Image (spheres, coloured by chain):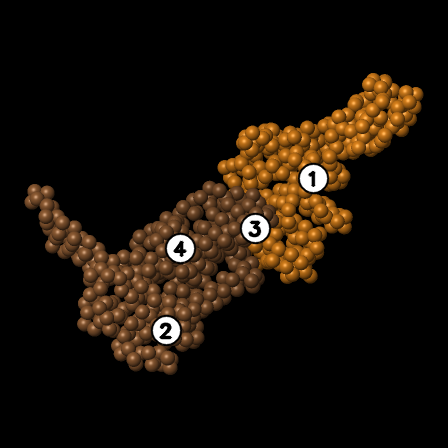
Amino acid sequence: MNALNIAYKDLMMLLKDRGQLITLFLVPIGFILAFSAAFAAGQELEAQVIAVPVVNLDPGGEMSTLLLQQLNDDRGLQTEDYDQAQAAADLSDETIKLVLTIPSGFSADVQAGKQTTLRLAYGPAASDSEVQAVRLVVDGIASDLSLETQLVGGLSQMGAMMGDAPAEVRVFTAERIATQAESQFERAKTTPLVALSAKWPDQITQGREDFNPSSFGVAGFAIMFAFLSAQTTAASIFEERKEGTFRRLLAAPLGKWELLAGKMLPNFFLAILQMVIIVAASLVLLPLVGQQAPTLGNSPLGLALVTILVALCSTSLGILLGALCRTESQVGGISSVFLWIAGMVGGAFIPAFVLGDFLNAIGKVVPHYWAMQAYNDLMLRGGGVGDILLELGVLAGFAAVFFAIGLRRLRFA
Amino acid sequence: MSEPILISQDLKKSFGEIEAVKGISLQVARGEVFGLLGPNGAGKTTTISMLTGLLEPSGGQITVDGLDLKSHTNEVKAKMGLVPQEMALYMSLSARQNLMFFGRIYGLKGKELRQRVDEVLEMTGLTDRADDPVGDYSGGMKRRVNIGAGLLHKPQLLFLDEPTVGVDPQSRNAIFESVEALNRAGMSVIYTTHYMEEAQRLCQRVAIVDEGRIIAQDTPTALIRSLGGGVVLLGVSASAPEDLAERIAQVPAVKSATRSDTYPAGSTGGQLKIETQRLQEALMQTLDITNQLDVRITSLEILEPNLESVFLHLTGKKLRQ
């Protein structure tokens, strides 16, 4: 009963603090609106396809055909055939912005291992970003083609040389080496050779299949701000200790457990309320400002379980911070920086697939990551409770560890 | 003495290697105002913390109203009230909200709670400002709410821990009057302070605490009587003869004269502590001796017989050093 009295008192104090209320409820909604708008704009830009006029002076050639196929293969470019004179005229009167010319004998030269040059001409109407985008894509494909041809040629030569060796030391035939090399390159097409430029768009494409920026933003900021509210508990514990009210309360017929429960309850319910308000406000407000409403998936039970565990985790973290912080600046400043960084590496701000392997690995040590994975599974991929058992377990584990350390380190007076 | 409300036997508390309380035994009678006196750092607050169940003693036993504190913690706590030294209040809440909260914590509810809050507000003279945030109050008003919060549940034994620190003279008098009124109503009070004049005015008995021990325990009158007439502190120049204290000790009106380890600030000389039953006579004869020996006097302080001089007599130190 006394725990409820303490919780009621803390809530009364919170309701008198307008700044705190704004931080808890309005700031996250503002963040979500801004984030969704920015991400949606980014998606529109990414979805634009650049038209690339092509003058093919090597029509029907194996390599030029392969080049054109790859240029049109979901790389953000769309080639259009032009004859040479028309392309020159249109470029000069700015009807087209740029033109790519495949030289005659291109396929034969590449297959023979001779040097050949693709030419990209552009006029004043072409923007730097368009020119750079086309150049990067063409460079990448051309390099792969060139590399493949050279390598296959080299391996074939080796095979031929081995063919002259005595039968007892001949391990590979030329055919077998060539087959092996070509098979390698088939795999290289699905797993691009240059890791950074090839992997990145592949992952984005994969994530984008079910990526809804509103759902991501709502889940991310709900988690981010739920964990930031741990500071409310920490600050409240710090204040009680500083002002001596803990001392007065502990002189009353009241157990330490009741006191601790009383300090935890407000944050627990506030964190849940905060997340519910964030989702409800997003469902209403985002469509009003022309953004996509978040999808909530098919498992209300799953959402409720994740939300409860996030609130529990945040509350336990508040006890831990309250126990560890010795000064006001530690409560307000250092723990705030820690929570923002944890939110970032945990993927609450920026999608985990954008962060890269290193930050993704680091992110796993913060509860934000697991909460985010759970929400994404439920909201973006339509999963159920069975799909997020690991995440739920890890979040419960974080809550238990935070609480145990906090309880051990907490000094009441 | 009537049946004690509180008995503490050989109470000890250590923090690591530091022994803060080294075996305190005391008894507080029902309806008594008992003073716990001593300088800052003497162990008063640690003792109060153990007596109120905030700190677990390293040794010893505490009994309140016949109940052992350790085995009946909450029952005993319900019989006691604590007014901490600091303003242990929620500044953003009003006096009424603070009192309602602390009342609920002690199990009051409904009509009884509202009635007690109104009574305490009336008693502390804060009815008109009851709904203003405590943070907007003056220091004296906050102090009154602080005391009021300890009285809501009508404790049998009230602990007042240095209640007048940082309080203006007017509010200090109001606090004295409140304590006297509570005592007249039959409440037992343990009052800690390092202001001896407060103890002299309010307490029926006092225990003087120094370095974690009780060094004297009696009524203020008996303690003062044990000292006699008074104490003269005489600062002398460095050139004073070594045997000056012995010479002064032979004066008939002087009870004892000792060189004190305590020197007046900024002085390069020494200080003599002269205890006497006949203050004026002893002082005249002492000055005759210093004139004869051509000793330069650098300071002279006469301590009328009071608890302050009792403390000096017992410890060789001033209370507020």
Q: Is residue B266 visible?
A: yes
Which x, y percent locates residue A254?
Answer: 51, 46
Q: Secondary structure at mark 2?
A: strand
Q: Which residue is mark 3?
A: A329
Q: Secondary structure at mark 3?
A: helix
Q: Is residue A184 visible?
A: no
Q: Which residue is mark 4?
A: A346
Question: Which color is chain B depicted in?
Answer: orange
Residue B193, numbered label:
1
Question: Which color is chain A depicted in?
Answer: brown
Chain letter, disc 3 residue: A
Name above or below for residue B95 compared with residue B301.
below
Q: CA distance from mark 1 to mark 3?
A: 33 Å
At a point 53% along the width and 56% down the height, the residue shown is: A10
Q: Are marks 3 and 4 on the same chain?
A: yes
Q: CA distance from mark 2 to mark 4?
A: 43 Å
- Which of discs 3 and 2 lies nearer the camera? The answer is 2
Q: CA distance from mark 3 to mark 4?
A: 24 Å
Q: Horizontal placement of A212 versus A342: left or right?
A: left
Q: Secondary structure at mark 1?
A: strand
Tell me the amino acid under the disc marked 3.
Answer: Ser
Chain letter, disc 2 residue: A
Tell me the amino acid under the disc marked 1.
Answer: Thr
Name above or below for residue A371 compared with residue B320.
below
Which x, y percent locates residue B298?
Answer: 85, 30
At a point 10% along the width and 45% down the height, the residue shown is: A165
Q: Which residue is mark 2?
A: A122
